[in-house]
Image (tube, rainbow, N blue to C red):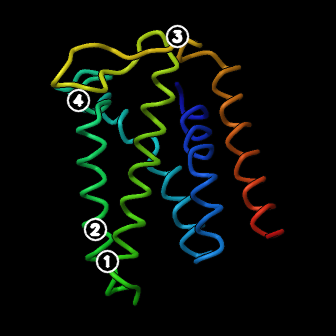
Amino acid sequence: MYKAGHYGAALFVYAPVGFALLSVDPAFAVLGGVGSVALSRVPDYDLRVPFLEHRGITHTLPFLVAVAVLLGAVGYRAAGAFGTDPARTAGLGVIVALVAVGSHLLADALTPAGVPLLWPLSGRDYSVDVATASNPVANYGLLALGVAACGAAGYLAGSV
């Protein structure tokens, strides 16, 4: 998928998380959503690193776990600067990583090329072959779906 598709996938995956966070801490809910969208293209940074293959290691579950651990640690360390509970801030970092990278992997699994989720245990690429990565209908459709899901989550959270 392209930028719009990844942003939409992140919003769609984040919507139920954001809904739950809105009742607990609206600021964290907004920060989590912004972080999830902002980091949703991190796996594609492999395109900028000469020795990395596109849709290689950065499109795997081990990479997802590594990013979650890293953002959790950053959140834990940053808590003091923001006057927040370290466990909550670390938890938000983990959630943002899981949504951002996880939604990216899910969106790329919609394409014929798929993703090597279980590398290094398996070299298989997982794909449901719904649309090509460059398909504008798929990309903007995901964006519209994500915006609608977040809008619905915000509306419902205000109604509860």
Question: Horizontal placement of 141 versus 84: left or right?
Answer: right
Pick the residue in front: 153 or 40. Answer: 153
Secondary structure under tag 4 reads helix
Distance from Cα at disc 1 to Cα at disc 3: 40 Å
The residue singled out by tag 4 in the image is 57
**Mark 2 in CB contact with mark 1 (< 8 angstroms):** yes
Distance from Cα at disc 4 to Cα at disc 1: 28 Å
Q: Earlier in the sequence, mark 4 or mark 2?
A: 4
Q: Earlier in the sequence, mark 4 or mark 3?
A: 4
The residue singled out by tag 3 in the image is 129
Which amino acid, by three-letter code, is at mark 1? Ala
Could you say which disc has been placed on residue 74 in the image? 2
Could you say which disc has been placed on residue 78 in the image? 1
For the C terminus, give its image quadrant. bottom right
**Mark 4 in CB contact with mark 3 (< 8 angstroms):** no
Which class describes the residues within 10 Å of circle 3: few (<14), some (14-19), or many (20+)? Answer: some
Question: Horizontal placement of 13 versus 152: left or right?
Answer: left
Q: Residue at x 53, y 67 (%)?
A: 31
x, y percent for residue 89: 39, 74
**Mark 4 in CB contact with mark 1 (< 8 angstroms):** no
Distance from Cα at disc 2 to Cα at disc 3: 36 Å
Q: Residue at x 74, y 61 (%)?
A: 154
Distance from Cα at disc 2 to Cα at disc 1: 6 Å
Could you say which disc has been placed on residue 145 in the image? none
Distance from Cα at disc 4 to Cα at disc 2: 22 Å
Front position among marks 4 and 3: 3
x, y percent for residue 22: 64, 70
x, y percent for residue 134: 56, 16
Question: Horizontal placement of 26 versus 60: left or right?
Answer: right
